[in-house]
Image: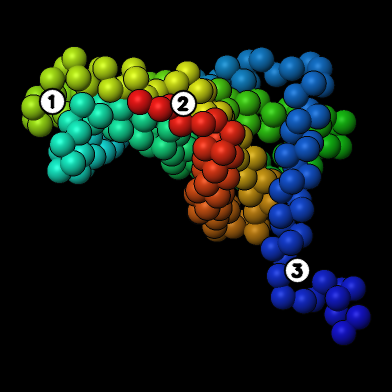
Amino acid sequence: MSNRLAAGNFPGAGALSSTGKLFALGLDVVVGIFQRPFQTREFIDQCWFISRVCILPAALVSISFGSVISLQLGSLIRQFGAQSFSGAASTLAVIQQAAPVICALLVAGAGGSAICADLGARTIREEIDAMEVLGINPIQRLVVPRVLASILVSALLFGLVSIVGVAGGYYFNVVLQGVTPGAYVQGFSALSKPTDLLVGFIKAALFGLAAGIVAAYRGLNPAGGPKGVGDAVNQAVVITFILLFAINVIVTAVYLNLVPPTKF
């Protein structure tokens, strides 16, 4: 038994090893942020690429999310005779939950998959090994700009998705469900706090961080060959989705315990 444990041939050894390497890569990325020279051009290129593939889908998805949340919550709140609170309920749901999750799904699905495929292709062509032979740190040169771009674009997309989602919710609550504009705005301003917007930005940034690191890790460690790169892309997206829901639960629980709800 001891020999098997020493050799790592026990159930879950591969998952534990991959988790440790993933966290090690995250620490290397943090260290690489402060190393010079900073790859400014690569960072700008990655920001532009991720933004270009995510902005339009984010806006379209946020409209549907905002409308569904507003219609569902508005119908439920009307049964209790509290139509004036429909603005607060739908807007807070969009800002705290829907907008960060939409950003994470799009950044991971579009930007993260592209990052993983690019790094995976470089790995199987042995470009990463060649960079190390030449004394170039691939983490600082390739991974850090991509992770920072994922964080920045995810945070900026959060602002866009929040605005479009709230506007869509306003339209469906006021026009379709008959809530007066004054009551909608008053309910939101009475129950919301600046920290609600802040926690949304924090979630979006953390989701972007997770998407960038997971995509980079799987891209740097493909199974081998083009098929291995394709499998790595699929695994990166799935792992990121699992992580974002875990992060969402943790951050939401901490926020609700640290920040008391507003009393109306």
| Residue nearest the viewer, comparing 17 with 136 | 17
Residues at marks 1 and 3, CA–CA distance in whole angstroms: 56 Å
Q: Which residue is at a point 78% across and 37% down the rendered structure image?
A: 27
Q: Which residue is at a point 26% across and 17% down the rendered structure image?
A: 186
Under mark 2, the amino acid is Asp
Badge 1 element = loop
Q: Which residue is at a point 47% across and 18% down the rendered structure image?
A: 194
Q: In the figure, residue 12 lies in which quadrant? A: bottom right
Residue carrying label 2: 196
**Rendered image: mark on residue 179:** 1
Placement of 258 over or under 171, stated as above or below? below
Residues at marks 1 and 2, CA–CA distance in whole angstroms: 23 Å
Image coordinates of residue 9 in percent, x first then y, are 79, 76
Mark 3–mark 2 contact, CB under 8 Å? no
Image coordinates of residue 160 in percent, x first then y, are 38, 21
Q: In the figure, residue 189 lies in which quadrant? A: top left
Q: How many marks?
A: 3
Q: Residues within 10 Å of mark 2 (few under 14, many from 20)?
A: some
Placement of 101 over or under 4, stated as above or below? above
Q: Locate the N terminus and report the quarter of the image it occupies.
A: bottom right
- Callout in the foreground (1, 3): 1
Badge 2 element = helix
**Rendered image: mark on residue 13:** 3
Kindly give the residue lying farthest to the bottom in the view shown.
1
Q: Which residue is at a point 74% across and 61% down the rendered structure image?
A: 16
Placement of 127 over or under 136, stated as above or below? below
Badge 3 element = helix
